[in-house]
């Protein structure tokens, strides 16, 4: 991908090359190993081209992580809200306890108190996780398992927020499956059912 005899990449093509290179570095070296020099070398561009798009390595790392996390998200369709929710929560738990989780924790630490970067990392995968939960809820509404009022972003974000809380407050390497079942059965499903009374 090095620049040289070929035509110069611009716009979306260059951005894609930079994000791809940054994602590779994150996978191999984690957040601590992400440098603008290494990303520029792998993307076949210069650091100025990167800085024009991302103000610092943490912002670039967040964008690259979201790309990695979004690629991992698939929406289950088991025919049951309980099973779909457990599947999504188990996948998130598996991701957060894997090397991807280490990358996420490294980026959160590097972001410090920057609210805009922390907001992008909020659910560990950007918009793909929220979209997956809203899709699962939408299917449950269509099947008659949930009222239309349950199809709300706050409801959709509850299981992941509770899972994230387990990691933050308990410092565990992975959350036990029994806790995931509790989150779904004792909090999420009652919340979904309770929304039917708001009409």
Image (cartoon, rainbow, N blue to C red):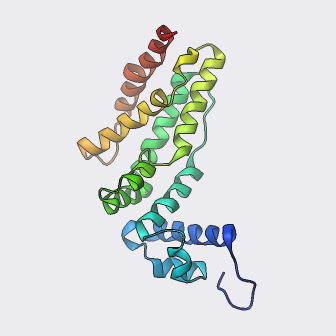
Answer above or below: position of 92 versus 62. above
| Quarter of the image where one finds residue 32 | bottom left
Q: Residue furthest left?
A: 170
Residue 82, percent from left and from top: 51, 23
Residue 79 in view here: no
Q: Residue at x 38, y 22 (%)?
A: 187
Q: Residue furthest bottom?
A: 5
- Name the image quarter holding the N terminus: bottom right
Q: Residue at x 43, y 25 (%)?
A: 184
Q: Nearer the viewer, residue 188 or 9?
A: 9
Residue 96, percent from left and from top: 41, 49
Answer above or below: position of 169 versus 157. below
Residue 120, percent from left and from top: 45, 51
Q: Nearer the viewer, residue 31 or 170?
A: 31
Residue 57, percent from left and from top: 43, 70
| Quarter of the image where one finds residue 17 | bottom right
Q: Nearer the viewer, residue 168 or 198?
A: 198
Residue 1 in view here: yes
Q: Is residue 102 left or right of residue 5?
A: left
Give the mark count.
Answer: 0
Q: Residue furthest front?
A: 52
Q: Residue at x 52, y 26 (%)?
A: 152
């Amino acid at each position: 991908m090095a620049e040289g005899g070929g035509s110069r990449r611009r716009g979306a093509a260059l951005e894609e090359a930079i994000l791809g290179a940054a994602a590779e570095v994150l996978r191999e070296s984690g957040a601590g190993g992400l440098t603008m020099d290494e990303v520029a070398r792998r993307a076949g561009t210069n650091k100025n081209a990167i800085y024009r798009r991302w103000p610092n390595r943490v912002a670039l790392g967040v964008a690259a992580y979201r790309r990695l996390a979004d690629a991992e998200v698939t929406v289950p369709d088991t025919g049951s809200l309980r099973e779909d929710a457990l599947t999504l929560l188990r996948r998130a738990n598996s991701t957060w306890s894997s090397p991807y989780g280490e990358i996420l924790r490294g980026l959160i630490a590097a972001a410090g108190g920057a609210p805009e970067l922390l907001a992008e990392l909020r659910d560990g995968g950007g918009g793909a996780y929220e979209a997956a939960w809203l899709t699962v809820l939408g299917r449950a509404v269509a099947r008659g398992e949930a009222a239309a009022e349950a199809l709300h972003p706050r409801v959709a974000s509850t299981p992941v927020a509770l899972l994230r809380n387990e990691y933050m407050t308990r410092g565990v390497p992975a959350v036990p499956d029994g806790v995931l079942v509790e989150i779904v059965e004792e909090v999420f499903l009652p919340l979904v059912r309770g929304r039917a009374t708001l009409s």
